[in-house]
Image (cartoon, rainbow, N blue to C red):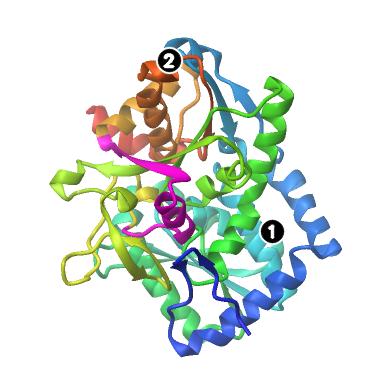
């Protein structure tokens, strides 16, 4: 019998009956193999030798001096394919292989999850189809090419807002009709159980490493951990190691043009309880319960929902979430690039902008902060160039 997969009242399984056997099969396999010696050995091998783990915890001295905090960056941007997404795609693709699946399908917004899925499929010899909203296809052309070069087929989705939400809808429809030989490789801590728990498990390597590294470098835990939040996988990955400690946890959401404008992706800051893509969480919706379109300069934060555990962390007060405006994220992008020579993904730039606002408060001066730098900014250079009014 499948577990309910709840975080407090959030999470659960709200899917068509046709998908229940697939979720039961997936949960059973995950529980069977997550601690299996052979599976763990394979996963650790690929994460180390293929993906490039462990990633560094870099003391950003220039940024620290500029902001007045002791800033450490967890360098997930140094991983193969350019972001934390590879941790989860290797884990799930390996699990799919153990289950006898031959095909992977995925959704992607910014393209990083699609690239990481394409890479994992190529590595393990599996067919890969990636659903991507046509708006995201247009603004992430380089990532589309990277997926196709790695052997994946990118399927544009032209319905709805033509972004991540609609790509997920289409991937769900595919999975219903192909479940016998296909694994749906969800890229974040969202969706029906067991996905939020499973993706957190595969991303928790970020937090385990960061905890061990900061204790070695500082001899104590940080005061604060900051990460960007769209669906929420990089944030849950690093938060997971500090939830039981006296460490402040802050998630930076995509604020778009501002909550007042209604043109944003700040689900936790401005949303309400609702069901989206198989689980109960906070969602952006109108008075009739219809899902609203989300907006962020970052395609990876352009999602009207959020992982259910983040909703639980917010409601219990264990973590707080702050909307970051598009222009603030651009400032964060420039700040890290200028002072450290590290060009962040626009998603990660939201976390840097959140750090800057945090450091501006007198009570936070001198505190030790870890920022999860979830990805690098190669993919976003043309977008940034447009925002800055220069030719890419």
Q: For the C terminus, which image quadrant?
A: top left
Q: For the N terminus, which image quadrant?
A: bottom right
Say which residue appears at 67% left-offset and 25% top-offset.
220
Say which residue appears at 54% left-offset and 55% top-offset.
149
State the SS at label 1: helix
Q: Which residue is tagged 2?
A: 67
Q: Which residue is tagged 1?
A: 123
Judge by depth and name the residue closer to the eye, 5 or 347: 5
**Where residue 361 sits: x, y (%)?**
36, 20
Q: Residue furthest bottom?
A: 18
Horizontal side of 33 relative to 21 (left or right) equals right
Task: Identify the image quadrant of residue 390.
Answer: top left
Q: Is residue 36 above or below residue 319?
A: below
Classed neighbour count for the residue bearing mark 1: other residues with Cα under 10 Å, few (<14), some (14–19), many (≥20): some
What is the magenta range?
304-326
Say which residue appears at 45% left-offset and 15% top-offset.
365
| First along the sequence among labels 2 and 1 | 2
């Amino acid at each position: 019998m499948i577990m309910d997969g709840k975080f407090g009242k959030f999470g659960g399984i709200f899917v068509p009956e046709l998908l229940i056997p697939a979720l039961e099969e997936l949960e059973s396999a995950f529980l069977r193999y997550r601690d299996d010696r052979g599976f763990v050995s394979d996963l650790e091998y690929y994460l180390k030798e293929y993906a490039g783990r462990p990633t560094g915890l870099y003391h950003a001295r220039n940024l620290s001096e500029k902001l007045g905090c002791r800033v450490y960056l967890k360098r997930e941007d140094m991983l193969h394919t350019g972001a934390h997404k590879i941790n989860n795609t290797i884990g799930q693709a390996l699990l799919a292989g153990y289950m006898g699946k031959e095909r992977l399908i995925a959704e992607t917004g910014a393209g990083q999850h699609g690239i990481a899925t394409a890479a994992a499929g190529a590595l393990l010899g599996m067919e890969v189809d990636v659903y991507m909203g046509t708006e995201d296809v247009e603004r992430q052309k380089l990532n589309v090419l990277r997926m196709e070069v790695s052997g994946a087929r990118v399927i544009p989705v032209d319905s709805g807002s033509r972004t991540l939400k609609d790509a997920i809808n289409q991937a769900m429809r595919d999975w219903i009709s192909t479940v016998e030989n296909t694994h749906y490789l969800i890229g974040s801590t969202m969706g029906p159980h067991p996905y939020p728990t499973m993706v957190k498990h595969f991303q928790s390597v970020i937090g385990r490493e960061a905890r061990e590294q900061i204790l070695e470098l500082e001899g104590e835990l940080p005061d604060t951990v900051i990460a960007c939040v769209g669906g929420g996988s990089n944030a849950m990955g690093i938060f997971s190691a500090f939830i039981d400690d006296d460490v402040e946890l802050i998630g930076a959401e995509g604020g778009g043009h501002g909550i007042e404008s209604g043109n944003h992706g700040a689900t936790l800051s401005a949303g309400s309880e609702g069901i989206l893509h198989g689980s109960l969480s906070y969602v952006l919706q109108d008075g009739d319960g219809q899902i609203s379109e989300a907006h962020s300069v970052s395609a990876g934060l352009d999602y009207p929902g959020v992982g259910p555990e983040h909703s639980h962390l917010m409601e219990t007060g264990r973590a707080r979430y702050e909307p970051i405006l598009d222009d603030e994220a651009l400032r964060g992008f420039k700040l890290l690039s200028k002072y450290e020579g590290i060009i962040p993904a626009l998603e990660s730039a939201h976390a840097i902008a959140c750090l800057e606002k945090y450091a501006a408060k007198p009570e936070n001066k001198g505190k030790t902060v870890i920022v999860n730098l979830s990805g690098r900014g190669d993919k976003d250079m043309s977008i940034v160039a447009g925002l800055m009014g220069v030719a890419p």
